């Protein structure tokens, strides 16, 4: 059993997002005091988190954040985006690289030695997707920081309020058929958001995680078409009709239309999807003392939670 010392304060960025809120719950449950950076306009996303401190600010404007972070023993940086909006200054380089560099600067200035980072499975120097390349550049800055760091690279994260499994479940319920890009045999290894959140909280008190980058994924990899079938089974739609769209056609359309806010895909997203997202997560589960959960079990829990709240 892990033993947790009480009353350590953690500074969290990106805590208002889907994964961030789960990490906040896990930190509080494990006895940490939490100070969360909240960007203007995101205050409502922390409704129900009365036990945490809120600090107004922006990771892209590091001035003034040092005082807010003082007294904390660690920074947990969860800031990230999956789609760019350059006209609004929302780019992978700014939110992945610059934001991380800013928080490293804050950590050093505030005397904080512990730094835990959310990266992504597939992050590497020669990645085809800009999303993965900038995640890797952020990792490089962390490795060169001199801090006691831990990096997590999750595969697809699912849970109530996520961006993929929830969307696919709605589509399976409402559409006569679900579109599939290409043959649908590319493999994903989904992991429940609760397990990722647990890992972030536990890492802060497990010395063996310092200087380690962990690939976080579910216990089993599945072809995308099988993931659709498992989601269908979990929501009571055991037969999921699928319509396959040729990969070359989808790429061509996306290249032309990805700049439109209403268009649902980007070239980066297609690249990452067909590349797949799989790993050997044994070190993740071993070092963090977390028991792997099957995708089907996580889905049953996820949609059971939704039914309990009365949401579709």
Image (cartoon, grey):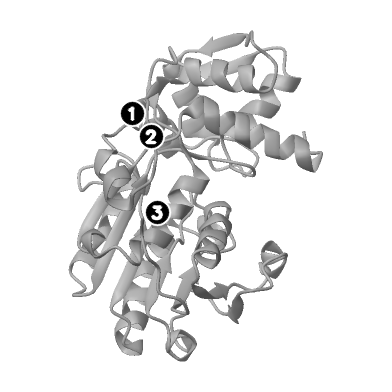
Q: Nearer the viewer, residue 307 or 163?
A: 307
Which residue is label 2 attached to? 272
Which residue is label 1 attached to? 275
Q: Is residue 135 above or below residue 259?
A: below
| Quadrant in the rendering for residue 29 | bottom right
Q: Are marks 1 and 2 in contact (CB under 8 Å)?
A: yes
Q: Is residue 110 left or right of residue 57?
A: left
Residue 50 seen by the camera: yes
Which residue is label 3 attached to? 199
Q: Are marks 2 and 3 in contact (CB under 8 Å)?
A: no
Mark 1 secondary-structure assignment: helix
Residues at marks 2 and 3, CA–CA distance in whole angstroms: 24 Å
Q: Which comes sooner in the sequence, label 2 or label 3? A: 3
Residues at marks 1 and 2, CA–CA distance in whole angstroms: 5 Å
Q: Measuring 67% from the left and 20% from the top, which residue is drawn there?
A: 172
Q: Is residue 3 left or right of residue 308?
A: left
Q: Measuring 69% from the left and 70% from the top, which residue is drawn there?
A: 43
Q: Nearer the viewer, residue 27 or 148?
A: 27
């Amino acid at each position: 059993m892990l033993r947790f010392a009480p009353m350590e304060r953690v500074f969290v960025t990106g805590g208002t997002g889907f994964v961030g809120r789960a990490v906040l719950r896990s930190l509080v449950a494990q006895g940490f005091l939490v100070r969360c950076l909240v960007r203007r306009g995101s205050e409502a996303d922390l409704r129900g988190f009365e036990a945490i401190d809120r600090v107004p600010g922006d990771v892209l404007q590091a001035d003034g954040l040092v005082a807010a972070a003082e007294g904390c023993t660690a920074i947990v940086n969860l800031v990230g985006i999956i789609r760019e909006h350059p006209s609004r200054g929302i780019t992978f380089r700014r939110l992945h690289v610059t934001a991380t560099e800013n928080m490293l600067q804050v950590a050093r200035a505030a005397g904080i030695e512990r730094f835990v980072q959310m990266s992504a499975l597939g992050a590497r120097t020669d990645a085809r997707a800009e999303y993965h390349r900038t995640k890797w550049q952020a990792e490089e800055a962390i490795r060169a920081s001199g801090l006691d760091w831990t990096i997590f690279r999750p595969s697809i994260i699912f849970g109530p309020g996520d961006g993929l499994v929830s969307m696919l479940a709605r589509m399976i319920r409402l559409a006569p058929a679900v579109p599939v890009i290409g043959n649908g045999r590319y493999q994903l290894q989904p992991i429940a958001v609760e397990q990722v959140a647990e890992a972030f909280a536990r890492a802060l008190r497990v010395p063996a995680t310092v200087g380690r980058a962990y690939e976080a994924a579910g216990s089993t990899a599945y072809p995308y078409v099988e993931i659709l079938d498992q989601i269908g089974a979990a929501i009571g739609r055991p037969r999921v009709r699928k319509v396959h769209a040729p990969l070359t056609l989808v790429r061509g359309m996306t290249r032309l239309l990805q700049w439109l806010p209403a268009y649902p895909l980007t070239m980066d997203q297609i690249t990452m999807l067909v590349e797949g997202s799989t790993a050997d997560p044994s070190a993740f589960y071993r070092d963090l003392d977390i028991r792997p959960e099957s995708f089907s079990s996580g889905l049953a829990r996820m949609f059971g939670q939704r039914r309990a709240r009365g949401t579709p």
